[in-house]
Image: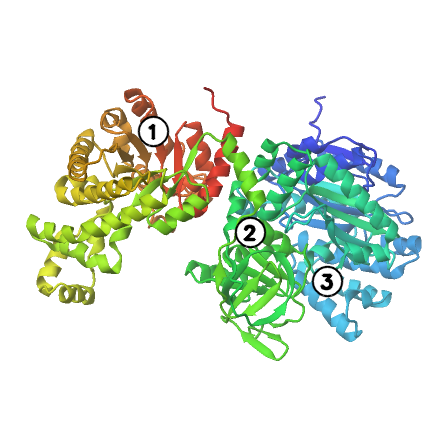
Amino acid sequence: MMAHKKHIYFFQSGKAAGSAKMKNLLGGKGANLAEMCNLGIPVPAGFTISTEACVYYLNNNRKWPAGLKEEIGKNLSRLEKVMNARLGDSKQPLLLSIRSGSRASMPGMMDTVLNLGLNNTTIKALVKLTGNERFAYDAYRRFIQMFSNVVTGLDGALFETELKAMKKRKKAALDTDLDAAALKELCESYKKIYKKKTGSPFPQNIGKQMEMAINAVFASWNNQRAIDYRKLYNIPADWGTAVNIQSMVFGNFGEDSGTGVAFTRDPSTGANSFFGEFLVNAQGEDVVAGIRTPLSVDGMEAVFPQATRDLRKIARKLENHYRDMLDLEFTVQQKKLYMLQARVGKRTAAAAIKIAVDLVKAKKITKKTAILRIEPTQLDQLLHKTIDPKAKLNVITAGLPASPGAAVGKMIFTPEEAIRMAAKGEPTILVRYETSPEDLSGMAASNGILTVHGGMTSHAAVVARGMGKCCISGAGDIKLDENNKTFIVGRTAISKYTWITLDGSTGRVILGKADLVQPELSEDFMTLMKWADSVRTLEVMANADTPHDAALARKFGAKGIGLCRTEHMFFAKERILAVREMILAENKSGRAKALKKLLPMQREDFKGILKAMAGLPVTIRLLDPPLHEFLPHTETAVEKVAHEMHALVGDVKKRVETLSESNPMLGHRGCRLGVTFTDLYEMQARAIFEAAADLLKKKIDVRPEVMIPLVGTPEELKICREMVEETARKVQKRKHIKFPVIVGTMIELPRAALVADKIAAHADFFSFGTNDLTQTTLGVSRDDSGRFLPAYVEKGIYPYDPFVSIDEEGVGALMRTATKAGRSARKGLKIGICGEHGGDPQSVTFCHKLRLNYVSCSPYRIPIARLAAAHAALNHPRKS
């Protein structure tokens, strides 16, 4: 008889079949439970069903793999022996928790069932065994509600409404104020709801309860909130979740019990201080759901001194073992501490950097480990704005500073509205009584989150920190009226769409739009980036078009400008008339007159940028977009331009019609303008070289590079290069100064990639314009693709949005071809990219593997690109 594959791993304190290294198989929760057991930490015994079993179940019409049922029975018997209790027993009943656990932390995204094993028989046994009728029926009502919601899919609000009605009848302020009789009555009401909604009585067969709960946890891998979370954090859909079946310990046993969540360091700031929250007489979901405002760990110490001392000791032991900040879940039952979970804690970017740097200083991790601990995209959080300290603020209330930063937006009350308004580009603040995992998409769409209930470890707080969203939780002074779409603070009523500001660093809620400023980067940030720069091989440049952007890019660590777009300078109000005059000119002399006006403007533009980047290269792209972009397109606008230019409306309209194109992105643009309107490119080249000459004479080290766009043939580049070099010679002669003339091209057409060896004969460098290269390779318009690309990604046609991360199979193949061919023709050819992909970590890794010299991105993406390049160098070392 063929042996079945092992799917279950048992654990108990002091001994476990698994370990922290088995995260892929046991999920993060299961692997860490096993690791804690192996360390001798008090953990309720149980067993983990592997992620492979879940994947099998989901891929095989919701059937269990062969042998799993028998394995469960065998391990359940072992658990019953360890716990000296039996599932469904009428005298010594065993109760279980059934929890999910992916290999990547997905807090609150999948399902959990607690207190499984209760029915009309075992509830009586639990009352007799504990002598605590209130506790027993509190556990039973929680189980019925959780099972009904998680396993059967009934709306949890049905049960919450019944609970609120009971509290009102009994004049109870809190759930804990309800006595045993009330809870017993509530259990009967819950069972009636279940029967009414499902047509069947609440299940009394404990084995069936367990099977249904396991299936529900397996299936929760594909619930909508889990799918949304995986998309948000790029977690593969084929990983599946493990199922952790564990003997229950009870934080709701009475006033000598409780439950909590703790972090070994502050998850918001990274400060080396133990941080946690605790509720007396509660179960775990009460803390993370924010149903009651919890005590701090210091408050817990006053109630349970020995358990708190044990918790602090275990926290130190675990952090030293894992060498990282940990998120801990624990329960105190009758003053005895039990650990339910340890995992690497979610933290803000600022906290992540401080913790990593501090651990290096403490010699607990290496610099390389510290670099790899910080996800490049996390750095985006550090660049968020904060409230201007000089701003006059109307602070209306305050809550807990759950996730730092600042956010301004229109107040709304539903996640659906946040999504709708975000699609229109309207900033919002999502206000909720408390958030739940179903709110995830709305939280992602909003600028900030404000909740009335909940603590620093509530769902809103944890998810917001992971997203880098500003969040204030536990703003208890707010009276929320969701029906009338208002909230009331004191005597102030604030209605939907009112502008408010959140200060996530202090917890302040501010009426109106506060002025925001950019943050100063910490010393720890500078230290980490210095370490990153020491290991990366890719250089990071900036896409910048103004002296301000150039200075900002330099501040963020850019080693030059990889793309300066000259067309952006033409749209300034004082220049657009001259540009239009040049375009509307009917002959060369008319164009020359307009270009003469533009020359000094362009020269001053280039002076400012070159000076801001003194000592570093500045790659200036000559005019790229089609000329019609500078012209009016409506009747009213045409009339206005005609008036401003003292021209006839008919003449302007005729010229606009002449220049119009059916497909302008593939029309008269880029180097085609330079070939046909040579004087336009000559003016720009002259402005560049005159600016450089003037600055060089002042002993300012400037290094301009000229980039010709949209080249598809070597002849195009040869013509444009000769014109640029001739212009440079004239400037050098006139200014009596010599300087190097560096001319390169963008590779943004498939043909250019295929004939790159021939183009390289005329180029000092290549720069992949990955935005246009993606459009021309895929035959997809970036501006119009939003109508279908999400569906393509959803259906797996593309693994991800090719305008966010480089399409390595298609566009990447052309880049490989061009790089190899270009360097075969011109040894040591400098090659980089300057599309928006330059700030995407996945694309940066691809560029590193391709052995490019640099990536160029917008200023605020520079730190991300620097760290991503370091990750790439450490994970994929280049062979010399």
Name which of mark 3 and mark 2 comes first in the sequence: 3
Which quarter of the picture shows residue 153?
bottom right
Question: Residue tagged by mark 1?
Answer: 830
Residue 12 sits above or below residue 389 on the image: above
Which of the image's four quarters has the C terminus?
Answer: top left
Q: Which of 239 and 740 is in front in this view?
A: 740
Distance from disc 3 to disc 2, alpha carbons, whole Å, reads 23 Å
Mark 1 near mark 3, Cβ–Cβ under 8 Å? no
Amino acid marked by disc 1: Lys
> Callout 2, which amino acid?
Gly
Identify the residue under disc 3.
293
Mark seen at residue 731: none
Q: Is residue 750 left or right of residue 880?
A: left
Q: Mark 2 points at which residue?
A: 468
Helix, strand or loop at mark 1: strand
Residue drawn where x is 64% and y is 71% of the image: 478
Q: Which residue lies furthest to the bottom in this view?
A: 491
Q: In this view, does 8 lie to the left or right of 848?
A: right
